[in-house]
């Protein structure tokens, strides 16, 4: 993994353009994403065949949605952005233009590894402008909603601790702690796939969701077993939960902090990103 930066201190853009096409998890529609280098710092989104300039992402663009992170940009909505954004920020990129068609990012294999492979295909090059400043944590704080909890404490590096607890024996309680670097992201987090539960499929389909879901792009748990083994990691679910967290933090950047997430959700992640954005803006 010599192509990756050693840490998250530098400013990096892509070495060229790279494109991926696939089906969206919830819409079931095919869409295309092209990743391009850009001199302006941050992650920027625009649509194919649109004259409007790219919009720089920030946490205020996130809207509440079920089972994924969605954003509103002007009069357009873009679903399921978290796996792509996790790949970008996780690999150390800081300057990227995301050119999209359709209204949902392709799910690909349900993880971030195919986006990582796309990034590797063109490589990273030093950006000509500085990166956006990372959020600075001055003192510990806690966010919670119901049984979900996030604690954030200052640290010299980005350290993540994820905890999940499901009533399904195939998952049960899982804990994972790691210092996040581009290499640990690619090796330990990016391959982890999204997962769901067989007993919830009918209700989700009736709600108009997971139209593009299949056993090829999502792990499905049936109580004591998985319908589509083998798992890539014995604790793949908690690794995917941390993947989602990283993608949701991409709107503001990875802070030098220890972040513990118990039963995390996209909604609580968005609250964290907004709070970190406010703290950064006030400095």
Image (cartoon, rainbow, N blue to C red):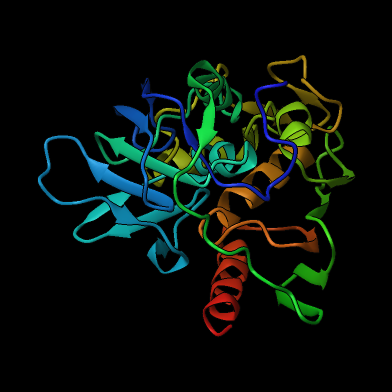
Residue 218 spot, x, y in % from top left: 59, 27
Q: Is residue 181 above or below residue 52?
A: above
Observer-nearest residue: 62 or 125? 125
Q: Is residue 80 visible?
A: no
Q: How many marks?
A: 0
Q: Which residue occupies 34% across, 30% down?
A: 33
Q: Is residue 64 above or below residue 27?
A: below
Q: Which residue occupies 88% across, 44% down?
A: 174
Observer-nearest residue: 93 or 27? 93
In this rendering, would 15 be left or right of 156?
left
Residue 180 spot, x, y in % from top left: 78, 45
Residue 194 spot, x, y in % from top left: 62, 34
Which residue extends farthest front?
128
Which residue extends farthest bottom?
282
In this rendering, would 55 be left or right of 181?
left
In this rendering, would 223 be left or right of 193?
right
Q: Is residue 42 visible?
A: yes
Residue 70 spot, x, y in % from top left: 41, 53
Q: Quadrant of residue 264?
A: bottom right
Q: Which residue occupies 72% across, 46% down?
A: 242
Q: Quadrant of the N terminus?
A: top right
Q: Is residue 88 above or below residue 22?
A: below
Q: Quadrant of the C terminus?
A: bottom right
Q: Quadrant of residue 193?
A: top right
């Amino acid at each position: 993994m010599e192509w990756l930066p050693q840490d998250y201190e530098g400013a990096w853009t892509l070495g060229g353009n790279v494109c991926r096409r696939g089906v969206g998890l919830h819409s079931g529609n095919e869409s295309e994403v092209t990743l391009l280098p850009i001199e302006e710092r941050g992650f920027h989104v625009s649509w194919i065949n649109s004259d409007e300039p790219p919009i720089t992402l920030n946490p205020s663009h996130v809207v509440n949605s079920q089972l994924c992170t969605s954003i509103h940009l002007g009069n357009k909505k873009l679903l399921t952005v978290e796996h792509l954004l996790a790949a970008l920020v996780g690999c150390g990129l800081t300057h990227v233009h995301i050119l999209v068609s359709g209204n949902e990012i392709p799910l690909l294999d349900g993880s971030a590894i195919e986006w990582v492979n796309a990034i590797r295909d063109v490589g990273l090059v030093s950006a000509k402008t500085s990166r956006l400043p990372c959020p600075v944590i001055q003192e510990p704080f806690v966010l919670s909603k119901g049984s979900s909890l996030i604690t954030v404490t200052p640290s010299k590096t980005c350290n993540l601790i994820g905890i999940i607890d499901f009533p399904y024996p195939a998952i049960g309680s899982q804990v994972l702690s790691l210092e996040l670097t581009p290499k640990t992201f690619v090796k330990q987090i990016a391959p982890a796939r999204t997962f769901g539960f067989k007993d919830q499929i009918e209700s989700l389909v009736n709600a108009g969701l997971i139209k593009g879901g299949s056993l090829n792009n999502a792990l499905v748990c049936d109580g004591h077993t998985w319908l589509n083994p083998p798992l890539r990691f014995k604790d793949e679910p908690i690794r995917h939960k941390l993947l989602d967290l990283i993608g949701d933090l991409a709107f503001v950047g990875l802070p030098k902090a220890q972040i513990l997430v118990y039963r995390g959700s996209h909604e609580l992640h968005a609250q964290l990103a907004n709070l970190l954005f406010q703290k950064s803006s006030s400095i």
